[in-house]
Amino acid sequence: MAIQVSLRNKEREYTTILDSSILEGYNDSLERINPRLRKYLTGYGESNNQLTGSSPLMNVYLLNSGLISEDARLVTREDLEKVLSIENEFLGKNYVDFGLALRIENDSYKLNGLLIKVLLEDLRKRGIKLGKGKLISLNLLKLKEDEDSTYGCVFELNDKASKDSIKDLEEYRWDYSRNEGLTRAYLDGDRRWNSYDPRLDGFNSVGRVVVVSGEATAQKFLDNYISRLKKENDREIKKIEEEYSKRIDLLKVE
């Protein structure tokens, strides 16, 4: 599975599966937020030096945490379509969150009621009509702590959000979709475009966080991954050598 793929665009950007080097700093940062929200943000893990787990709540918090490079952003639907046309094995069987799908004002999934209300008000302030639904990139969002929310927070649009950056859901093909409320928008492990799941806090170990950055930052991400991989390999080699030495000692005859 590829770790990094060039988007071959004029900006010379690369998509990178984020490594787990930020995990300790991320978990430390959660100590400063309210316990209810902390519960929904505590979900990242690590496997083979990659950061595992993904949810809209965790990814938006991470994006705004200052733990990743300033010139890096989260992957978008357009980025994923491009990179899969270049390297179909990028991501393997892992899923990737890239946005929120907001369709109508009402939602039978009650946990999202307040979040919908806040997003609709933010859209109204920017003169954006909901129409038949909007796809909001995770890059256009920030979290605001809110005691009235089940999650302990709500999503707000950030300064990058505009009529041009927020897309109509009808512009895209969806393999699975829901006709109400607010859902996560993600590419699942079977390469299906999904805007059905309303669980904005849901995650599991096959989730990955993919970032897009310029060439210099992409190289730093790659160097960091290689360095961590080498250290892990060195530790494994040391363990093998120690075990070998013990077995040799046992075979020695006085």
Image (cartoon, grey):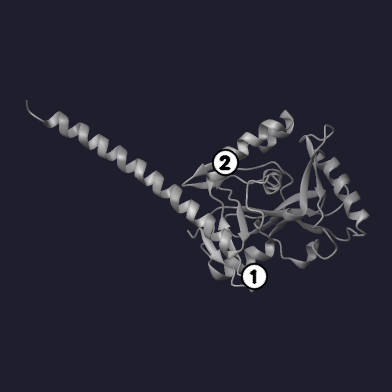
* Amino acid type at image mark 2: Leu
Residue 251 is labelled as none
Whether residue 43 can be seen here: no
Direction from residue 207 to residue 152 in the image, left or right: right
The label number, if any, that marks residue 23 in the structure image: 2
Q: Could you give the CA–CA distance between mark 2 and mark 1, rounded to whole angstroms?
A: 29 Å
Q: Judging from the image, what secondary structure is the residue with disc 1 in?
A: loop
Q: Is residue 36 visible?
A: yes
Mark 1 residue type: Glu
- On the image, the x and y values in percent for residue 30 come to 67, 34
Q: Which residue is mark 1?
A: 11
- Where on the picture, by quarter, is residue 132? bottom right
Q: Nearer the viewer, residue 102 or 75?
A: 75
Please name which of the two marks, 2 or 1, marks the residue nearer to the observer: 1
Q: Is residue 199 above or below residue 69?
A: above
Above or below residue 119? Residue 36 is above
Residue closest to the far bottom: 10
